[in-house]
Structure formats: C-alpha cells, structure tokens
Image (spheres, grey):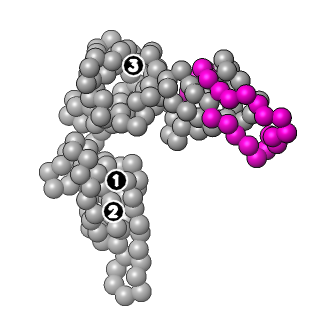
Amino acid sequence: MGIKINGNQVRIGMVLEYQGKLWRVSKTDHVKPGKGGAFAQIEMKDVMTGTKLNERFRATESVERATLEQYKMQYLYDEGESLVFMDNATYEQTMVPKDLVGDMLPWLQENMEVEIEMHDENPIGIALPEKITCTIVESDAVIKGQTVSSSFKPAKLENGQTVMVPPFIETGTAIVVNTTDGTYVERA
C-alpha cells in the first residue's frame, strides 16, 4: 500500500499509484483560480509502458504515492536487452531492462554505483551519479584568436558521446560530465 497525500503535495519525480498502474510525475502546475478551489494539473508517464496521462487533482483530493525501496547497486555488465547490477550488501544480482535506463545508458560505466528504485521486487527506476569522469578520445585543434569565454568546441568521449568543451581541453584529457544533461563541468 502507498501513502495518501493531498493533490497539492504532488511533486516532479514522485511515483503515484493511480488507476491500478504506477505513474512517474513529469510535470506539475499548481493553479489557484479566482473562482473555485485550487488544483494541481499533473502530467504523468506510465512506468511500464511510457504512456502519458494528464490529470487534474483538487488540493483536498487524496492521491496514493507508491512505496518504493531504494537500493545501492553496482553495474556489472550488459546482457543483451538487460543490464546486470549487484546489490552491494547481499551480492544478489538483478537484471534491469535497458529501456528503464533510457537516455542515461551512454553514461553508465562498469563498476559504477547507482541507486535503483524497486516496487514489489521489480526495478522501476534508476539514478546515476550526477557527475562522472570521462576521457576525451577526439577533439578539434585550438583555433588561434578564439576567445576562451565565448567559444566551445565539440569533443568525442570514450563512450561515443559528443560534449562541448572549452578550447584548452585536448584529446586524452579526463573531464567531469553532468549525467543529467550531458554537459562539460570541469577538468578531472
């Protein structure tokens, strides 16, 4: 059973049990019209299918927030359509579908410690560390006369992703990358 919360307490990232399914909240808009009661306009995505749903919950209406367990796990290896993780406490291995990781898949590195959300023993979400270190395998040469403040150049990382970096960063340099948006943070 989940925890009952008011409609105005729903926040982005929460997982709700609604209409017999699990939904992750992707957008919220709290509205207080001049006439009538306040409500929250919520955009949710089905955790299993990715289907979107827009619902309106009044501030006094109760919604069920799903009870999730978070486990720290270590990424071991790729096995076809799944990824294998190991619980650091019990050494038990868990298979997670690749589509659950989604756009963050390129940032996943071997032996990386991640947080996996589970509901009824089934993985439903994964959180990577906010920042990781990657090595540049290919970057353009510095162009004389470019100002450091305004110009960035593309650099290809060991995982195949391209990141915009300052001109002084060269091939072979280790950099810190933000995993949420894939941007350069600093030199490692």
**Where does label 3 land, which residue?**
75
> In the image shown, does 117 or 54 lie closer to the viewer?
54
* Magenta-tinted stretch: 131-154
Residue on which the image places disc 1: 25
The image's mark for residue 128 is none
Considering the image in quadrants, where does the C terminus appear? top right
Percent position (x, y) of residue 126? Answer: 37, 33
Where, quadrant-wise, is the N terminus in this rendering?
Answer: top left
Q: Residue at x 67, y 36 (%)?
A: 153
Mark 2 and mark 3 lie on one chain; the one further toward the N terminus is 2
Residue 92 is situated, as x and y percent measured from the top left of the image, at: 28, 14
Residue at (47% x, 28% y) in the render: 107
Badge 1 density bin: few <14, some 14–19, many ≥20, Cα 10 Å: many
Q: Looking at the picture, does residue 59 appear above or below residue 114? A: below
Q: In the image, 83: left or right of 152?
A: left
- Give me the residue at 16% from left, 56% from top: 19
Task: Report which residue position mark 2 lands on.
Answer: 42
The image quarter in which residue 35 lies: bottom left
Q: Nearer the viewer, residue 71 or 4?
A: 71
Specify the amino acid type for callout 3: Tyr
Residue 143 belongs to magenta span: yes
What amino acid is labelled 1 in the image? Answer: Val
Residue 45 visible, this angle: yes
Categorize mark 3 by other alpha carbons within 10 Å: few (<14), some (14-19), many (20+). Answer: some
Q: Residue at x 35, y 30 (%)?
A: 116
